[in-house]
């Protein structure tokens, strides 16, 4: 073999061939200046803070959120929905009549034509009231027939389906997942065979499938189906195996079986199975027509990046907002050991962390949605948003459950925590399992997409253009020295001299410099490691996941600065913004430190050891330079939030609050506001207790009566205190069920 041949073989070993479905996934979507600059070690702060700004919601969008969405929330009783196993008929009718299922579809076809931000705001608000209603609305406005048709459908398909989907006359579902193909969606076994109808001679497709976990399947009238298309006689002229294809099939088609329902965590949203055997459909069923046969996977991956950026991050944001309000309020209402439980440092730690995460989720979500509304198809940011919004959402639920304790674990109509607790594992599971997303997608695909030379190198090697590959290889090697030099320059603090970041508010400048440091260090480690291992790095999951963590936390911290700046550098949210940035900087730095540990670094032996120590020096990853948020900051956040002022309102501004009395959230709100308003009266009551030698374990009414007798409270004040106490007890008490009525789910 010639020297040229050996060199090409060496390059091929670094850039092994990938499957067609994997290549389509890698090629789909776009890269923005935000994640691209963070990966490459030099954050573009003008793009991060000032770029990708699609503008405010329209007046129509705002009105829909403030009116129709609020009205829908008023109609919902989440506990009753769970008990009945479905939304009430009047709710279904309202959802369809008001075009909640057609927010994605353009006005041209009878839809609402809302932006991604507007759709997110609707789903977020609904999620704080009823996850079942939110999922019902969310799914048709995410990956599914509506989006696929809008982007790829023929004119005839758009005319046939989009108006009926927008107005609820048709209800869609999208069937991708199977028993042997979940996260590995490219391995679906559903099959379509191109053949002629023996009766008519028409060329069509004979379909056989077995799908599960399909949301809205039990009530769907239109089935979107993903399958492998085979054409043994090459009737379509695309070879014997065109590949993954998507068809739209009315569910009343002969042979289509809409099967039984699943019970995901006993929640009531429609989810189930669909099967079919030798179901014959026309070529016109293919989304985009016969020309799109075999193009289904590319279509799905491109649309998934938009849907993944919206639906589940919206639910994660809703979870955080609901937990922030309810946990803050409950910790103020609830007393133990003679004081409000918010005053305990352990409780304060939980509240501060869930508040910081709630702020971070909102920032992460909105930044990614801004990319979508600016025309990007953000593959890597959407994966980061899905993974971290749901994981942080789970953290907020667990913190909330810890603080609520017994209140949080007793099922019943007065438990406002249980739906979030049951819904968040579902969000973590669907649209790509989180383990896969973290370990393989965020950095495994991200490094290929974001590195300036990986894609050109792979293309040159695939085309066997040795000279072109050599030139790219030289640039790649040169980039290692650039990465190392930049890291040393930034970590020595020299970049501050030439980049003061005067366009940022003073309180964010230091944080931006710290993000610069971690970004430069990350690139200094990731660049040579990726270059040495090539595509093999994606199989080193421990290292790939840690690299992904660094990139993710840099993206989140940068999103927090973006959010803080775009909202006018409001001092009322400075404490939680600081917490969110410090938390993510700490996690990014710790993940980078972990990558360079002997047991984690993907290159072993003496060579690997030398590389590790060199990278430690270059990246400045010794010690703990980016510490966790302090206890002082935690207490400041808890104190500020528990005053029920602007800070809490800003954190929960997308949440639904009932307009009428009654119900668990309304009762909590009444007790929270009453407790704060009665603080001075509580002080008078305690003074009367001390004067009379009464203890707090005395009956509350007796304590109040004693204070009146002593002249420390008048009758109106006493009545006020009793009313507040009763409101608190309505919150603290939990549901009871008569023995004869007890029915476990």
Image: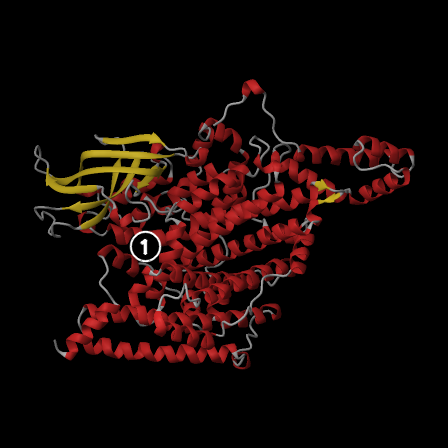
Q: Judge by depth and name the residue closer to the eye, 566 or 195.
A: 195
User: Do we see residue 141 in this rendering?
Assistant: yes
Look at 74% across and 35% down and name the residue there.
725
Q: Judge by depth and name the residue closer to the eye, 122 or 143.
A: 143
Q: Estimate the x, y position of residue 365 in percent, counting from the top left.
A: 48, 54
User: Do we see residue 99 in this rendering?
Assistant: no
Q: Estimate the x, y position of residue 267 in percent, counting from the top left.
A: 45, 34
Look at 32% across and 54% down and name the residue there.
302
**Picture quarter containing residue 598?**
bottom left
Relative placement, left or right, of 706 versus 344 is right
Look at 29% across and 34% down and name the residue there.
274
Relative placement, left or right, of 211 versus 313 is left
Query: Extreme top residue here?
Result: 740
Name the residue carrying label 1: 302
| Quarter occupied by the N terminus | bottom left
Q: Estimate the x, y position of residue 406 in percent, counting from the top left.
A: 61, 36
Determine whether 313 is above or below 619 in the image: above
Secondary structure under badge 1?
helix
Q: Estimate the x, y position of residue 624 in percent, counting from the top left.
A: 55, 68
Query: Extreme front residue here?
Result: 606
Q: Judge by depth and name the residue closer to the eye, 548 or 315.
A: 548
Determine whether 585 is above or below 665 in the image: below
Look at 39% across and 74% down and name the residue there.
611
């Amino acid at each position: 073999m010639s020297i040229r041949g050996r060199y090409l073989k060496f390059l091929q070993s670094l850039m092994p061939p990938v499957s067609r479905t994997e290549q389509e996934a890698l090629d789909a979507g776009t890269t923005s200046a935000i994640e691209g600059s963070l990966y490459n070690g030099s954050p573009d702060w003008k793009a991060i803070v000032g770029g990708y700004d699609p503008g405010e919601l329209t007046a129509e969008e705002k009105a829909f959120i403030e009116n129709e969405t609020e009205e829908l929330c008023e109609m919902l009783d989440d506990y009753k929905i769970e008990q009945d196993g479905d939304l009430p008929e009047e709710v279904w009718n309202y959802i369809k009549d008001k075009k909640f299922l057609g927010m994605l579809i353009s006005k041209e076809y009878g839809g609402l034509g809302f932006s991604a931000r507007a759709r997110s705001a609707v789903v977020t608000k609904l999620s704080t009231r009823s996850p079942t209603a939110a999922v019902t609305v969310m799914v048709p406005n995410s990956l599914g027939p509506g989006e696929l048709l809008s982007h790829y459908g023929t004119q005839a398909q758009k005319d046939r389906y989009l108006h009926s989907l927008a107005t609820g006359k048709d209800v869609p579902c999208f069937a991708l997942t199977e028993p042997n193909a979940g996260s590995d969606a490219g391995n679906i076994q559903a099959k379509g065979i191109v053949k002629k109808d023996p009766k008519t001679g028409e060329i069509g497709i004979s379909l056989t499938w077995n799908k599960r976990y399909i949301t809205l399947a039990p009530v769907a009238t239109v089935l979107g189906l993903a399958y492998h298309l085979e054409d043994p006689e090459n009737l379509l002229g695309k070879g014997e195996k065109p590949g993954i294809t998507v068809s739209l099939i009315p569910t009343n088609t002969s042979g289509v079986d809409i099967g039984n329902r699943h019970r995901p965590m006993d929640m009531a949203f429609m989810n189930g199975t669909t099967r079919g055997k030798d179901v014959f459909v026309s070529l016109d069923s293919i989304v985009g027509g016969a020309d799109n046969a075999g193009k289904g996977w590319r279509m799905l991956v491109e649309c998934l990046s938009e849907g993944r950026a919206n639906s589940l991050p919206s639910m994660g944001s809703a979870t955080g907002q609901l937990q922030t309000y309810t946990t803050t309020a409950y910790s103020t209402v609830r007393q133990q050991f003679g004081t409000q439980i918010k005053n305990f440092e352990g409780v304060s730690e939980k509240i501060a962390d869930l508040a910081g995460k709630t702020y971070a989720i909102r920032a992460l979500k909105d930044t990614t949605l801004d990319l979508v509304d600016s025309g990007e198809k953000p593959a890597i940011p959407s994966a980061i948003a899905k993974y971290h919004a749901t994981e942080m959402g789970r953290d907020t639920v667990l913190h909330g459950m810890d603080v609520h304790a017994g209140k949080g674990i007793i099922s019943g109509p007065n438990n406002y925590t249980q739906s979030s607790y049951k819904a968040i594992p579902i969000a973590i599971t669907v649209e790509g399992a989180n383990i896969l997303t973290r370990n393989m997608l965020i950095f495994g695909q991200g490094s290929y997409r974001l590195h300036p030379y990986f894609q050109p190198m792979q293309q040159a090697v695939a085309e066997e253009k040795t000279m072109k590959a050599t030139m790219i290889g030289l640039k790649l090697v040169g980039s290692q020295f650039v990465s190392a030099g930049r890291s040393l320059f930034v970590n020595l603090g020299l970049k501050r001299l030439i980049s003061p970041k005067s366009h940022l508010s003073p309180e964010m400048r230091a944080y931006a410099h710290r993000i610069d440091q971690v970004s430069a260090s990350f690139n200094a480690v990731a660049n040579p490691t990726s270059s040495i291992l090539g595509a093999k790095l994606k199989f080193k999951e421990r290292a790939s996941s840690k690299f992904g963590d660094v990139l993710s936390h840099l993206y989140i911290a940068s999103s927090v600065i973006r959010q803080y700046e775009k909202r006018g550098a409001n001092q009322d949210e400075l404490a939680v913004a600081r917490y969110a940035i410090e938390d993510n900087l700490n996690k990014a730095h710790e993940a980078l430190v972990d990558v360079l540990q002997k047991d984690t670094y993907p290159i072993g032996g003496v060579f690997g050891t030398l590389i590790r120590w060199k990278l430690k020096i270059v990246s400045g990853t010794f010690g703990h330079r980016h510490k966790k948020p302090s206890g002082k900051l935690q207490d400041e956040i808890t104190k500020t939030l528990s005053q029920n002022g602007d800070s809490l309102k800003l954190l929960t501004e997308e949440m639904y609050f009932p307009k009428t009395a009654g119900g668990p959230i309304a009762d909590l709100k009444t007790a929270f506001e009453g407790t704060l308003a009665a603080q001075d009266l509580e002080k008078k009551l305690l003074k009367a207790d001390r004067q009379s030698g009464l203890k707090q374990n005395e009956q509350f009414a007796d304590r109040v009566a004693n204070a009146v007798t002593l002249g420390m409270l008048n009758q109106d004040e006493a009545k006020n205190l009793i009313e507040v106490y009763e409101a608190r007890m309505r919150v603290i008490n939990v549901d009871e069920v008569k023995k004869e009525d007890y029915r476990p789910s």
